[in-house]
Image: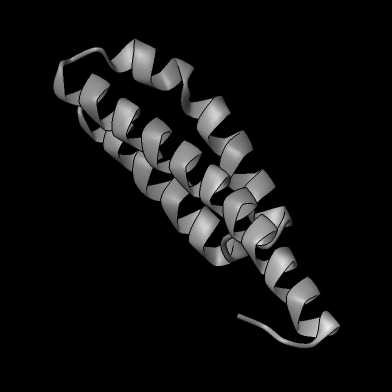
Amino acid sequence: MPITKSSQKALRQSIKRREHNLLYKKKIRALIKKARNLVLEGKKEEAKSILPEIYKVLDKAAKENVIKKNTASKKKSRIAKLIEKKS
């Protein structure tokens, strides 16, 4: 356990940040998984309908430095490509 006051505060901050970051990562993972499953089931229109929601979460995560900007772009590109390919 941290001894100094500053290191105790740093630990509290890092725990809070980790929870915040994991919330975004779980949301991203769940939405992408949902879209992939919809595509595999042949429900292309439903997958297209959640695409804006996926974009929004990825952009917000990139803005808040949870993931990098290029990673968000890569994920958006790949999921859009997957949905279009399965037509």
User: Is 12 rendered above or below residue 83?
Assistant: below
Looking at the image, residue 49 lies above or below residue 35: above
Q: Is residue 87 visible?
A: no
Residue 85: % across, % down: 24, 34
Left or right of 50? Residue 7 is right
Q: In this orientation, which residue lies closer to the viewer: 84 or 41?
A: 41
Residue furthest out toward the bottom: 4
Q: Is residue 62 left or right of residue 9?
A: left
**In the figure, is residue 52 to the left or right of 2?**
left
Q: Where is residue 80, by image quadrant?
A: top left
Residue at the far left in the pictured view: 41
What is the residue that sits farthest to the right in this orientation? 5
Residue at the (41%, 31%) spot, across then down: 31
Q: Which residue is found at the position 67% from the left and 68% from the top?
A: 14
> Which residue corresponds to the image point at 58% horizontal and 66% vertical from the top-left?
68
How many numbered discs, if any?
Answer: 0
Residue 35 vs 7, above or below: the answer is above
* Residue 23, quarter of picture: top right
Q: Which is nearer the eye, 18 or 11? A: 11
Vertical comparison of 43 with 13: above or below? above
Q: Position of residue 69 (x, y in %)?
A: 61, 62
Percent x, y of residue 1 = 60, 80
Q: Please provide percent x and percent y for residue 49.
A: 46, 16
